[in-house]
Image (spheres, rainbow, N blue to C red):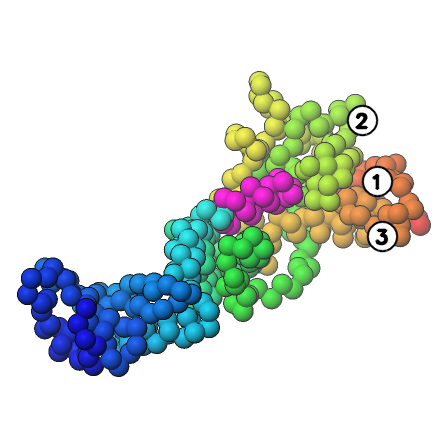
Amino acid sequence: MRKPIKLTQTIVDTMKVSAGKDEDTIADAAAPGLKLRIRREGARVYIFQRRFAGQHPKITIGDASSWSLEKARQKARELAVKMDNGIDPRVEKAVRIEAAKTTFAGVMRDYLEARGRDLKLRSFEECKRHLEKHWAPFHKLPIAGIERATVASRLRELVKVSGPVGTDRARSTLSAMFAWAIGEGLCENNPVTGTNKNSDDIERERTLTDSEFVKVWKNVPDNHYGAIVKLALLTGARRNELANMHWSEIDRKARTLKLPGERTKNGREFIIPLSDLAMEVIDSIDKRDGRDLVFGNGERGYSGWSNSKVALDQAVELKEEWRLHDLRRTFRSGLGQLGVEPHIAEACLNHLPAKLIRTYDKNKYEPQKREAFDRWSAYVSALIAGKRSNIVALKA
């Protein structure tokens, strides 16, 4: 190795290998530890080498064609500071390389496998959809290299196609995955933290008026989607509870739909009384040999929500925007207007009561629920028929 000199950019660009050698190395007197290695074929590389922990580790900084001398000196000083503080840059580099191998897609697979043991099927599928679809542009990125600006940029794209609420749900899913990854030691920071939410999360209060839900009832198509909408109006059930309904869950003699715990939000089995009108809707659906699912054609029941809702909106032309879940709120409000006591009305929705009541009151109020469902069905039938309902409020 040649005697150290104060390198200049001209020297770096023009220095030749000494006669009879294949390569040469010269130390920079202006930045201790920084050296320029030159090969006969023309390659020029900056390296850093100094004593550390009883050794003289050699660390490659970069090719001189892409690293300026000043930039190489700055890097050499950073490496020197780390060594002075007892940090081995070689170990740091190995960690970075390993982190780069840990891609978003790999972490996502491990996360879904871990969460699949805890989440209900519906929640798991929503989580999986968010990560696989909404965050697809991140799949090839190293998990530790994703920054807040990258997440914020993708959120701005998502809000244009998924809306504020859908975007915030995708954001929440991503944040949960990063929180898990931090716990697994796969990254140090959650880049979702500090990004802006897009919806105000104000609880919806939309209910359909009598004239509105009659209009919806009369304009739904004569298909699986139309039947689901009608049953949602009559039972207040969640759309996915109905979309994945099985023939084996229906007891015609008892006139009930029994939802198993794995298909309800609170994880508890729920029995829905079926009115005569609800049974008529169910009887309008043809059974298919070898298929226990009532609706849809896939493995998990009905799934064609978006296009069907758009078509229905065009048919009914309601002045105010509405969602299928608003039918559940309409059902609950209707029970209240009919005088159904609040704890019975909540039981009709499979809402768990307050902790004290849940602990000591094990009554499921099946007779009272049956009466409430039948009265609501009679009220709906009268409105559909264009008659003024003579239903009176239940006495407390």
Magenta stretch holds residue 115: yes
State the image coordinates of residue 32 (x, y, percent, origin top left).
30, 77
**Is disc 3 placed on a helix, strand or loop?**
helix
- Mark with earlier residue (1, 2): 2
Residue 114 locus on image (x, y percent): 58, 44
Q: CA distance from mark 1 to mark 2?
A: 13 Å
Vertical side of 371 occupied by 91: above or below = below
Q: Which residue sits furthest left?
A: 19
The residue drawn where x is 31% and y is 68% is 49
What percent of the width, then of the height, locates residue 162? 49, 55
Identified by mark 2, the residue type is Ala
Residue drawn where x is 42% and y is 71% of the image? 82
Residue 369 shows which numbered tag? Answer: 1
User: Which mark is first along the chain, 3 or 1?
Assistant: 3
The overriding secondary structure of the stretch rendered in magenta is helix
Position of residue 80 in the picture relative to residue 355 (left or right) = left
Q: Are marks 1 and 3 in contact (CB under 8 Å)?
A: no
Give the foreground label among 1 and 3: 3
Going 42% across and 59% down the picture, which residue do you hit? 91
Q: CA gap, disc 1 to disc 3?
A: 21 Å
Residue 254 got which mark? 2
In front: 249, or 53?
Answer: 53
Give the number of the mark in front: 2 or 3.
3
Q: Which residue is mark 3?
A: 355
- Give the structural element (helix, strand or loop) at label 2: loop
Residue 20: x %, y % from top left = 7, 62
Residue 17 showing in the rendered view? yes
